[in-house]
Image: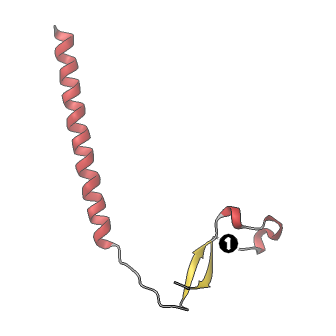
Amino acid sequence: MMLALDLILIEERRDRALASMARYQQQLAKSYNQRVQLRRYTLGELVLKKVLPAARNLVEGKLGLTGTTPIRSTQ
């Protein structure tokens, strides 16, 4: 009898914790999205393109492309 009651209380506490976590994540996302600024680029403007590890040439070593490289926008 006591064990069943404990299990019910544990499940209720778990449900409250999950609801609290979901509310926190929603608040965090809302706060982050309010601070994010959309950027519009015109054709031909220089922008940074992320170079993925698979696109790097291992022969070039540390003189090769780093994490980002400037390119002209085309779209």
Q: Is residue 22 left or right of residue 52?
A: left
Q: What residue type is labelled 1?
A: Thr
Which residue: 72% across, 67% down?
Answer: 56
Quadrant in which the N terminus appears: top left
- Which residue is farthest front? 75
Residue found 35% across the figure and 77% down from its top: 37
Which residue corresponds to the image point at 42% horizontal and 84% vertical from the top-left? 40
Q: What is the basis of the colouring in this image?
A: secondary structure
The residue at the point 26 percent across, 47 percent down is 22
Q: How many marks are shown on the rendered structure?
A: 1
The x and y percentages for residue 4 are: 19, 13
- Residue at the right extreme, as displayed: 59
Query: Mark 1, residues whose alpha carbon is within 10 Å: few (<14), some, or many (≥20)?
Result: few
Furthest toward the top, the residue is 1
According to the image, label 1 marks what residue?
66
Based on the displayed image, in which of its 4 quarters is residue 53 positioned?
bottom right
Left or right relative to 72: residue 2: left
Give coordinates of residue 19: x percent, y percent. Answer: 22, 42
Q: Relative to residue 22, is residue 48 drawn left or right? A: right
**Secondary structure beneath disc 1?**
loop
Image coords of residue 15 (percent x, y):
22, 34
Above or below, comparing residue 16 to residue 64 in the picture: above
Residue 17, picture quadrant = top left
- Above or below 35: residue 26: above
- Which sits in the foreground, 45 or 3? 45
Pick the front one: 42 or 10? 42
8 on left or right of 36: left
